[in-house]
Image: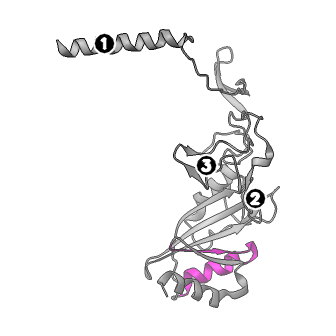
Amino acid sequence: MSDTQALAAQLQERFGDGLQSTTVRAGEVTLEIAPDNLLEVATALRDEPAFGFEVLIDLCGIDYANYGQDEWATEESSGSGFSRGVDARTAGHMTIVTDELAVETPGEAGRFAAVYHLLSVSNNRRLRLRVFAPDDELPVVPSVIPVWSSANWYEREAFDLYGILFDGHPDLRRILTDYGFIGHPFRKDFPLSGNVEVIYDAEKKRVIYQPVTIEPRVLVPKVIRAAEAPAAEVADAVDADTDATATEQAE
C-alpha cells in the first residue's frame, strides 16, 4: 500500500461518516466534506499529530456550471486533431450544430465549491479538501480563518471572483476587482465583455462607469481562393514554371 493510499485509509477510519467521499487520484487524496463538518475536520487535521496539516497553501473557488457538458469531443482524436465543436453553448457560437451531438458526463452535486490545499511539513504530506455550497443562488460555506489565518485573503479572492460567501470572515470584501464592480468575473455565466466599462469623461473630468458599448459578433473564418481557371491553363502554367526552374538550376 502506497503512502497516499495509507493516508486515505487513515482519514476514512478517523472521520468516517464526517466525510462525504475520499478519492485518490494522480497520487493525491481529496476529501469531500459537508459544510457543517468543515471546521471540526479542519481543526483535527491541523492539531492531531497523525495528520499535522499545519499549512494552508491555497484556497480557491470553483464554478461547476455546465460541468460535463463539452463543446468539443476530445475523448477521441484523429490524425488531423480533435473533432469539431459539438455543442454550441456559449454566446457567439454558430447554432448550426445540433444538440444530439452534445458530449455529456455526470456533473457534480452542486454548482459552487471551495477547495483547500493543505501541507503537512512534519509528515511531508499533502491533502485537498472540497466543500460544496448547499445553495447555488446564495453560496455560503464556513470560514476557516479560525483554523488557518492565511485563509483571509484567499477567501476574499474566492468571494470576489466567484461570489462565494464565507460565514465568519471578519472582513469579507472584494480584493481584485474595482470599487463598484458588478458581478463576479470567474462565474461561468459572467458576460465576456462585462457589465459596465470605464471611460474618462472630458466634461466631468473624471473616470466614470457606463453600460458596455461592445456589440458581440461571431467571427466566421473566410477562405479566399484564387479565381478558378480551366484545368489546361493550370497545367500549362505548372509546366512553364517547372521548365523555368530547371533552366535556372542548369545555369
Identify the image's colour scheme: rainbow, by chain, secondary structure or one colour: one colour
Viewer-closest of 126 and 146: 126
For the residues carrying marks 3 and 2, which lies nearer the camera in this image? 2
Q: Which mark is residue 133?
A: none
What residue is shown with label 3?
175
At x 69%, y 52%, the residue is 162
Circle 3 sits in a helix, a strand or a loop, which is it? loop
Which residue ends up furthest to the bottom in the rendered image? 13
Magenta-drawn segment: 27-48
Mark 1 neighbour density, 10 Å: few (under 14) some (14–19) many (20 or more): few
Q: Amino acid at mark 2?
A: Arg
Q: Give the side of residue 160 with respect to residue 247, left or right.
A: right
Q: Is residue 165 magenta?
A: no
Q: Amino acid at mark 3?
A: Ile
Q: Earlier in the sequence, mark 3 or mark 2?
A: 2
Q: Is residue 227 visible?
A: yes
Tell me residue 225's x, y (percent).
56, 17
Q: Is residue 173 visible?
A: no
At x 47%, y 84%, the residue is 3
Q: Which mark is residue 243?
A: 1
Circle 1 sits in a helix, a strand or a loop, which is it? helix
Tell me residue 96's x, y (percent).
77, 34
What residue is shown with label 2?
111
Mark 2 neighbour density, 10 Å: few (under 14) some (14–19) many (20 or more): some
